[in-house]
Image (spheres, rainbow, N blue to C red):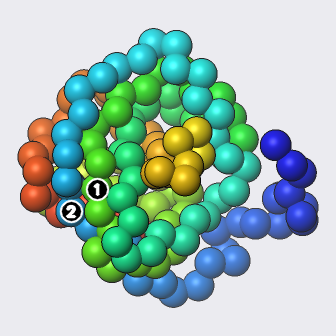
Amino acid sequence: MTSPPYDLSRITPDVYGDRRPVSGEVVALLHIFFEDRGLKLLEAKSRAMQRGEIHELMVTDEQGAAPGCGVDRVRAVAFFEVEAGGLAVVGDEVTISGRHLGTLAGYDMTHMPNHMGVLVKALSVDEPEMEVGDRVLIRRP
């Protein structure tokens, strides 16, 4: 992995101004849990998500999950299609059809260019209630 082009400590929540939520729709459900995933999150705190992209939604209960960290307890829950693109930022609230899922923890690029992994910190790694067609919203808290 290459080193960041700037001092990441300067990228605080204050640098992000007003922005619209990223919204989309669940297009496929996943039912897989890892105790030892070895996920390595990008050091980046934000990612642009473009309309039409499909990304994987994952949850963890590892409350220390953050950009640049490794994460083992991961449940892959769904793929979602971005319908209204925008900027997703670590710490954003993630909801599924209005139900709180958790807060955005970071991004995994293992499967790019096919899809990006979007990791959410949740209270548990139990399968969340969701179905194909549910609305995904990623927004500033």
Amino acid under disc 2: Glu
Task: Give above or below for 92 relative to 51.
Answer: above
Q: Position of residue 85 (x, y in %)?
A: 40, 77
- At mark 2, the secondary structure is strand
Residue occupying the far top of the picture: 35
Is the residue marked by circle 2 packed among few (<14), some (14-19), or many (20+) residues within 10 Å? many
Residues at marks 1 and 2, CA–CA distance in whole angstroms: 5 Å
Is residue 97 among what the camera can see?
Answer: yes
> What residue is at 64 percent from the left and 68 percent from the top?
13
Q: Can residue 66 be seen by looking at this rendering?
A: no
- Residue under pointer 1: 80
Residue at coordinates 13% horizontally, 57% vertically from top-left? 134
- Amino acid under label 1? Phe
Q: Is residue 98 left or right of residue 23?
A: left
Residue 98, which numbered label?
none
Give the mark nearest the N terminus, 1 or 2. Answer: 2
Residue 25, disc: 2
Residue 37, how many percent across, how many down?
A: 52, 20
Q: Residue at x 58, y 39 (%)?
A: 110
